[in-house]
Structures are given as structure tokens and as C-alpha cells.
Image (cartoon, rainbow, N blue to C red):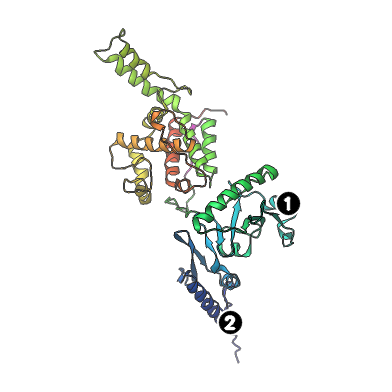
Amino acid sequence: MTNETSITAEPPPWYLPTDELEAVVSELEARCKASDIDFEIDYDGDGDSIFNIGFKSGRARRVLSIWDQNELKDLIELDFENYVFLDGWQALCNYKAGTIEALLTVPGGPNSPFEIFRRLFGMMPRDTGATNAKIVVGPESEGGPTLKLSKVSKLMRALAEGTSPASVSLEISGVKVNGHDDALGLLMKISNSFLFQLDLISDIPFVVRRQSVPRRRAKVAYDWAAPDLKFPSSEFESAPLSLYWYGRGAKGMPLLQYLAFYQVIEFYFPRFSQSEAHRKLKAVLKHPTFRGDKDTDVAKLLNAIYISRNGAYGDERSQLRATLDECIFADDLRRFIDEDEERVNFFSVKNKNSPYQKINSKSDDADLCADVSRRIYEIRCKIVHTKADLRDQDVELLLPFSKEADQLEFDIELVRYVAQQVLIAGSNAVSKMW
């Protein structure tokens, strides 16, 4: 007689029992409907349910996607329907209770949470269940807001992305706001001053965390074969290469990335602008009407050999353009732009959201390089806010943590590509040291 044992597969740990799940979803759906919160169920490629909850966020909606069904059970224990997001930020506002909670982060990557908690609360993150794991600052006048710096709340952990048990938030309570813009303005005004004070005292540079922007995956053809490498035949100057690696490592800091790659290009201005100056000088001298005793002709010569403070010829616009003309092949630049349809559309004249020079890869070679040079320079000016000549008088500052800074991804790819080509053009044959 054969004994057969029936083996029943255990459900994944992120599943709830069917009856319990139905009850949780029913309650969640009813509460969302009563509070004008979107709720829908989607499915991933494996057939697992994804529960999408759309919270108000200014004039838009912030969608929270939950696949772990245990988190649904935790969510219905919270009064989530009384909260809205502040658009662009990881911050929640409860108009009825008069509270705003904002998730904090350290720019450039988190410092050790152990060090942060030790400095703030004198304890480790695992010990912050204690009631003294917070800093409360009372109002300066009767009826003013109260500030609380503490471990992130259960609600923030449930609703905001990028949180952990060691996350820290700033809560403002006792406020009266009439809408989203008032709440956001109040948060920025109070948090900027309070967190600057905190930095001066504790050396922890907290800022309010922005809503993360979906990052586009670069369309690079990867395969499982080992990279086809060879012994180096070229060597690069250490200074521009250091700037290049700095730009590559400055993830999450788009303005630093952009400037680092721009400085790689700028390093070679003296070398490549000299060739342009030679051409201009020859053109002036070879002209049949040139006379050395005429002031206007002498002025043309001076303009052709104008030397800037960095030892390059011409103003910065012309130096950048001369460097691109010397280092970039238009066909390669065109191929770089056209290899990604999203990139083409972003630089296109049809993209009304971008305030910078448009780039049409179908332009002739000279116009293409001129448009790329102008766009790179426009963004550089908005970051450093210099007014090198009268044409820059209307330049507005491009601020860190702004939406415009978050939209620099394609432009960072472009200036990085140009920096790579300039590094290659500026390299020398490797010198033997063996």
C-alpha cells in the first residue's frame, strides 16, 4: 500500500488570508470613496495584486502603490483620509488638526543614522521608542506653532516613500492654513529657518525631502559577455578627469553633476580656443582691405586675440563653441541624440516646458553644434548666475531642490557626453613608465 502525502504550498508572507483581505479591502475602499481618495486594484506580471491609492497633492494626485497586503491592514488603523500631500515634497498636512509633518533627509546621501540619532537624541535608533526620543520647541507667542523633531510617525512611514525606522521628520502643529499653498509656504518658511539653526548647532544639514522624480533608465545595450577591454593607449590629465569622476559620483545632486561636467569642458578652453583665434586672426590679416594704420582694423585684430582670465581666447560663449567645434563630430552628436526617442522629444522645439535652446538633430552640422553649445551655456549661467555680458542680464537662478533642477536629467546626459568627447580629444599617447 502506497502512502501519498499531499503538499500544500504556503502562501507568500505578503498575503493575507482571503477572508481577512476581503474585509480590509472593503473597509479601505469605503473610506477612500467617502474622502475623495482614488482607489483601484491593478496586477503585476506575476498576477499579484497591487493596490493603488491616490491622495490629493495640490492640484495633482500622489499615488501610493501597495503590494504587501499586511501594509493594507496597518493602513486602516490610521486616519489616513484626513491627510493630503504637499505637492513636490514628502510632507503631509492635516488641515483639520492643524499639523504638517515633513520627512527630512541629508543632501548627497544619508549620514549614519546611528550618528544622527546620537547627536539629536543621545541614543541609538532602536531605543527611540522612549518618550524622550524627540525635541520639542514651543511657540514664541501664545497661539503660535509648536515644532517637534523626532522619529518619523507611523502615518508618514505608511504613506511616504523612502522611509525607514531610522527616518527623522519635522512636525509643525498648532497652525491654521486655508489650503495647500498656504501650508507649503508655512512649511518652507519655518523649516528653512529651523533646520539652518539645527545645522549650526549640531552640524547635521537636514532638508525637507523632495518627492522623488521617476528616473529614466538609460537605454544601453547590455549583454552577459565580458567587456572587450584593451591596454590603455591614451592618458588623461588628472585635473579634468577628477572633475569627471566627481560628476559621475554626484548622484542625486543634479546641479553639482552639471557643473562638474561643464568644468571638464572648461578646462580645455585655452587649448581649443587658440585654434579658433588663429583662424580669425588669419582671416583679418588676409583680407585685401586690411590696413595696419587703421584703428578699426587694429580693433578687429584685438577682438580676434582677446585673452580671457583663464588664458583662453574670446569670451566664454565663443570658447565653449570653439571647444565643441574642435572636439565633437556632428554625426556622433546626432547619433547620441537620436538613439533615445525620449531624449529627442525633450530637446525638441515641441517641448514647451523647457526654457532653453531647442536642439534639432536634423539641423546641419554647424547649427547642431551651435544649438548644443548655446543650451549648455544657458544652463551653466542659470546655475552659477553670472552676468558675463549684457546678454545675461535676465538670467534667473536655478536653485537646488527645485522642479527645474529635477528635470536636468537629459541635459546632464548631454553635457556628460560632451565632456567625454572633450577628454578624449584632449588626451595624449600613454607614456611608458615600465
Q: Residue at x 54, y 31 (%)?
A: 239
Q: Is residue 258 above or below residue 82?
A: above
Three-letter amino acid code at the position of disc 2: Ile
The span picked out in magenta is: 228-236
Query: Which corner quadrant holds the N terminus?
Result: bottom right
Q: Residue at x 53, y 45 (%)?
A: 253
Task: In the displayed orientation, state which residue is furthest to the front.
Answer: 142
Which residue is labeled 2 in the image? Answer: 7
Q: Is residue 131 above or below residue 199?
A: below
Dot placed on the residue nearer the N-terminal end, 1 or 2: 2
Which residue is labeled 1 in the image? Answer: 118
Q: Between residues 220 and 281, which one lies in front from this camera angle?
A: 281
- The reply, left or right, for residue 182 in relation to residue 351 is right
Task: In the displayed orientation, state which residue is furthest to the bottom.
Answer: 1
Residue 115 at x, y = what percent?
A: 70, 50
- The reply, left or right, for residue 250 in relation to residue 136 is left
Residue 85 at x, y = what percent?
A: 52, 60
Secondary structure beneath disc 2? loop
Mark 1–mark 2 distance (CA, rounded to whole Å): 50 Å
